[in-house]
Image (spheres, rainbow, N blue to C red):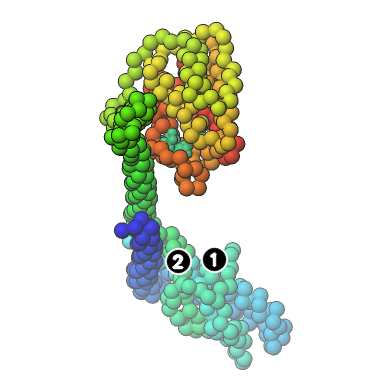
């Protein structure tokens, strides 16, 4: 299956999974909320039954006693002042009744007590809706409240809330000597959400952990998939490049061989020599490629083995540059190399492979005429070698991968030079085996500088 199909399918599956989890949480919340209402309702009913049974000793009666008292008092003022009662007087009276109800109200206390007994959350507020309140007078009654008005139990934070979410406890109709009242009592559980969340905490944690684990697994699986894809692309590129690299010398050898069997050429010793030279050059080239491939497969298993000897790097470098100049006369080389010797412990053979690779690459990836600047900076205990070319350069994205095995810059867009993508990997492995560092600076269409740092 194509990777992008796998990625889309698994992304889709992940989104479905997350939505199901989300849906599950909402469902669990609703079930818990329903369960909460049922459990708390039951306790409230029990509390109310007890409240009714224990009356008149308990709070309800004392509340009515106060109401009767204030109604009697009010009857006096109302009668003296104006039988048609002013609105402000009514409001004052109403305030007083509310204060009595909220201060002396026995419902919350009783219910809280019951809830506590059952180890349930006892935090609640009671609310009242007074439908009617009438002060009873000898000749004429004074109706105080006609409209529904709701007030919650706490006097200090009286909240008029018409959308009370609480549970209706009961409707009360009471008549005493000086008043009659008709009111509903509601209770509102202030910490309902917290109680439900705390009950759900286990489920929430499990769901969150499972989401986290699945997301992590998803991430790592996708990352591995991408890596595998990259490796398989690199491998197929490598095989294509290797086939090309092997075929070119082979077909040259076969052509030279055909030439050698030509009678005209057999008679001409100079031609024979030329053809045999071609064959031996291509043979050497083939051997180099095969060695490189063999070396790489060896490195899969073990680290590169160095034969360390003390060498004068200045002398070594000058020699390498001289032999490079012999083969590439067309290249302009400027060198800044100190005269005095700089001794390091190194494997001269491996180091020359590394240097040749860098210099060969400068030739392979040149842009017009190649100018090289070779700079050796020597410090007391380390040296830095800079090899700077004015070639095609490497873009920042490719720079990140350039030292990876089989990595080649996308050839069609940048250059057509064939290779195995092993050279720089080779160089890096050699330098690192020496305990050194290799890095580069490069700008597209300007050039590239490779830096090698080696310690004494
Ligand atoms: P190969 O040359 O066989 O492709 P290398 O590992 O030597 O493999 O190089 C990897 C890639 O780095 C090359 O394909 C080339 O695109 C880029 N490269 C290496 N050296 C240079 C350079 N001096 N200038 C520009 N590009 C370079």
Query: Residue farthest to the top?
Result: 340
| Residue found 54% across the figure and 80% down from its top | 130
| Residue found 42% across the figure and 20% down from its top | 352
Q: Earlier in the sequence, mark 2 or mark 1?
A: 1
Q: Nearer the viewer, residue 390 or 443?
A: 390
Query: Are the residues at dot 2 and dot 1 in contact (C-beta closer than 8 Å)?
Result: no
- The count of marks equals 2
- Is residue 77 in view? no
Q: In the image, residue 278 lies at what x, y percent?
A: 36, 30
Q: In the image, residue 269 lies at what x, y percent?
A: 34, 25
Residue 224 drawn above or below residue 320: below
- SS at circle 1: loop
Q: Nearer the viewer, residue 131 or 7?
A: 7
- Left or right of 25, for residue 69: right
Residue 245 drawn above or below residue 197: above
Query: Which quarter of the rendering shows the N terminus?
Result: bottom left
Q: Which residue is mark 2?
A: 189
Q: Nearer the viewer, residue 61 or 153?
A: 153
Q: In the image, residue 225 lies at what x, y percent?
A: 34, 49
Query: Residue farthest to the bottom?
Result: 139
Residue 145 drawn above or below residue 191: below
Marker disc for residue 405 = none
| Residue found 47% across the figure and 69% down from its top | 188
Q: In the image, residue 342 lies at what x, y percent?
A: 50, 10
Pointer 1 local density, CA inside 10 Å: few below 14, some 14–19, many at least 20 = some
* Residue 112 position by quadrant: bottom left
- Left or right of 433, for residue 449: right
Q: Gap in Å between the C-alphas at discs 2 and 1? A: 13 Å
- Is residue 233 in view? yes
């Amino acid at each position: 299956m194509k990777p992008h199909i796998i990625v889309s399918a698994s992304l889709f599956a992940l989104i479905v999974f997350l939505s199901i989890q989300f849906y599950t949480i909402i469902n669990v919340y609703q079930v818990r909320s329903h369960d909460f209402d049922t459990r708390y309702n039951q306790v409230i009913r029990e509390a109310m039954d007890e409240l009714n049974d224990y009356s008149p000793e308990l709070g309800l009666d004392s509340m009515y006693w106060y109401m009767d008292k204030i109604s009697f008092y009010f009857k006096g003022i109302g009668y003296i002042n104006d039988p048609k009662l002013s609105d402000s007087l009514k409001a004052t009276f109403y305030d007083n009744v509310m204060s009595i109800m909220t201060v002396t109200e026995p419902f919350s206390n009783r219910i809280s007590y019951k809830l506590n007994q059952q180890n349930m959350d006892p935090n609640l507020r009671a609310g009242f809706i007074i439908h009617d309140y009438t002060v009873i007078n000898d000749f004429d009654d004074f109706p105080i409240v006609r409209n529904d008005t709701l007030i919650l139990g706490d006097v200090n934070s009286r909240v008029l809330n018409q959308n009370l979410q609480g549970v209706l406890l009961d409707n009360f109709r009471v008549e005493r000597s000086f008043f009659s009242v008709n009111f509903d009592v509601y209770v509102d559980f202030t910490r309902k959400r917290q109680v439900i969340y705390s009950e759900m905490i286990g489920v929430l944690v499990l769901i969150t952990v499972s989401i986290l684990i699945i997301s992590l697994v998803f991430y790592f699986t996708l990352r591995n998939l991408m890596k595998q894809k990259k490796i398989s692309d690199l491998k197929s590129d490598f095989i294509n490049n290797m086939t090309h690299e092997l075929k070119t010398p082979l077909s040259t050898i076969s052509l030279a061989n055909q030439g050698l069997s030509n009678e005209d050429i057999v008679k001409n010793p100079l031609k024979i020599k030329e053809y045999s030279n071609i064959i031996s050059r291509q043979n050497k080239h083939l051997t180099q490629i095969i060695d490189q491939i063999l070396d790489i497969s060896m490195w899969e298993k073990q680290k590169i083995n160095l034969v360390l000897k003390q060498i004068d790097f200045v002398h070594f470098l000058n020699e390498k540059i001289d032999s490079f100049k012999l083969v590439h006369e067309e290249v302009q080389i400027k060198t800044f190399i100190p005269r005095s010797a700089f001794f390091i412990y190194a494997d001269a053979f491996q180091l020359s492979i590394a240097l040749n690779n860098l210099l060969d690459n400068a030739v392979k990836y040149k842009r017009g005429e190649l100018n090289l600047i070779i700079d050796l900076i020597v410090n007391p205990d380390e040296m830095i070698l800079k090899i700077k070319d004015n070639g095609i350069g490497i873009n920042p994205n490719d720079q990140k991968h350039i030292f990876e095995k089989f990595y080649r810059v996308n050839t069609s867009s940048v250059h057509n030079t064939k290779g195995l993508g092993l050279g720089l990997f080779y160089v890096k492995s050699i330098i690192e085996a020496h305990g050194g560092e290799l890095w580069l600076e490069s700008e597209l269409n300007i050039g590239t500088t490779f830096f090698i740092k080696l310690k004494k």
